[in-house]
Amino acid sequence: MANYRIATIEGDGIGPEVAQATIKVLSEACGAAKLDFQMFEGGAGHYMKTGQVLPDDTFKACRDLDAILHGAAGLPSVTYPDGTEVGNDLHLRLRFQLDLYANVRPVKLLPGVLSPLRAFQDGGIDYVIVRENTEGLYASRGAGVLLRNEFASDSLVITRKGTERVAKFAFELSRKRRGAPRDGKRRVTVCDKANILRSYAFFRSVCDEVHTGFPDVEIDYAYADAITVHMVKRPDFYDVIVAENMFGDIISDLGAATAGGMGISPSGEIGDANALFQGAHGSAPDIAGQNLASPVATILSGVMMLRWLADRHEDTSLEDAADRVEAAVGVVLSEKRAVPVDLGGKATCSDVTDAICRAMN
């Protein structure tokens, strides 16, 4: 039996609660000997104590172990002198230093979850947003210009290499899926503002070039403003959406809202050699330590981690474990065995965790 070493950073706020919940569920699904969760420090709280948001030993573990599981990072009150949050640096440093270029955000309406879009029920929303994670407007973080407190400027960076690889990732992902719920077609939608900025026109043109290698997958286009309307009125049309960093960040949260909210929204940050998995939500310090956080987003991120490891190591037992966890989450939510507070229920973090473990058995 393979023993996969998981660099685990609990982080800030509700991070320790949802990380421990995920460890419990994944260990139950895989067996205690299969996954070795090794704990490391990092985040805003650690910065307050030591002046380091990402210690060297934590980075080395994230680089060298088999995968990264993260709880949550950031505390709004802990900022650098320029006003930016310290906690964001943990992700940004890992993204750039490990080249985690594809931020993968599944948007899926789970069984038993009520969408604010009244026309859609379980299965009617099921697509993935692939956000380029190392370029775009966010690449300017820490490098922008503030001149005499009168003028501020940040640069939007799009490269051929960065666009080619994230577009290829998106098309390959579509090939692995069953297509859009509306028509079953495999489709990649390019989200941009090619009508306004040359940088986005270049992004689109490179995606077109990559598409020539995937004749079995349709290509579609949507401007970033228009897609916010389409994601609300016809989310069943989408299969995979690929976008620049900032646009992908914005539409990912909109997508999560249509499928029940951030508390059940998973994410993965994936490169060629490393990958980090965490819930898409923040650290929610206002409810930290109260056992009120929903662990579902982080548990489903753990499912993504199992599938990534299964594909990377050709380990079907991990794929089977991922299926069991995902099915158990669906049973718990659809049968109302333990409904998290953020979905209108009263179940605690530990209630939801225990219910998922029981459902697997």
Image (cartoon, rainbow, N blue to C red):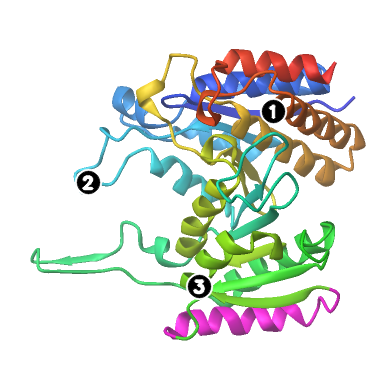
Report the amino acid beneath label 3.
Ala
Badge 3: how crowded within 10 Å, few (<14), some, or many (20+)?
Answer: few
Q: Is residue 269 above or below residue 243?
A: above
Residue 208 included in the magenta stretch of the image: yes
Q: Disc 1 vs disc 2: which is toward the camera?
A: 1
Residue 94 included in the magenta stretch of the image: no
Badge 1: how crowded within 10 Å, few (<14), some, or many (20+)?
Answer: many
Q: Residue at x 66, y 21 (%)?
A: 23
Badge 2: how crowded within 10 Å, few (<14), some, or many (20+)?
Answer: few
Q: Position of residue 276 (x, y in %)?
A: 61, 41
Q: Say if residue 170 shows up in the picture.
A: yes
Q: Is residue 148 above or below residue 118?
A: below
Q: Position of residue 225 (x, y in %)?
A: 46, 71
Q: Residue at x 82, y 20 (%)?
A: 360
Disc ID at residue 202: none
Horizontal side of residue 185 vs 166, given as left or right: right
Q: Magenta part of the protein: which range?
A: 196-216
Helix, strand or loop at mark 1: helix
Q: Which residue is mark 2?
A: 83
Q: Are marks 2 and 3 in contact (CB under 8 Å)?
A: no
Q: Residue at x 70, y 70 (%)?
A: 188
Report the amino acid beneath label 1.
Leu
Q: Answer with mark 1 or mark 2, whichever residue precedes in sequence.
A: 2
Disc ID at residue 226: 3
Q: Answer with mark 3 or mark 1, whichever residue precedes in sequence.
A: 3
Q: Position of residue 190 (x, y in %)?
A: 61, 73
Helix, strand or loop at mark 2: loop
- The residue nearer to you, when weighing 250 against 330, is 330
Q: Which residue is mark 1?
A: 333
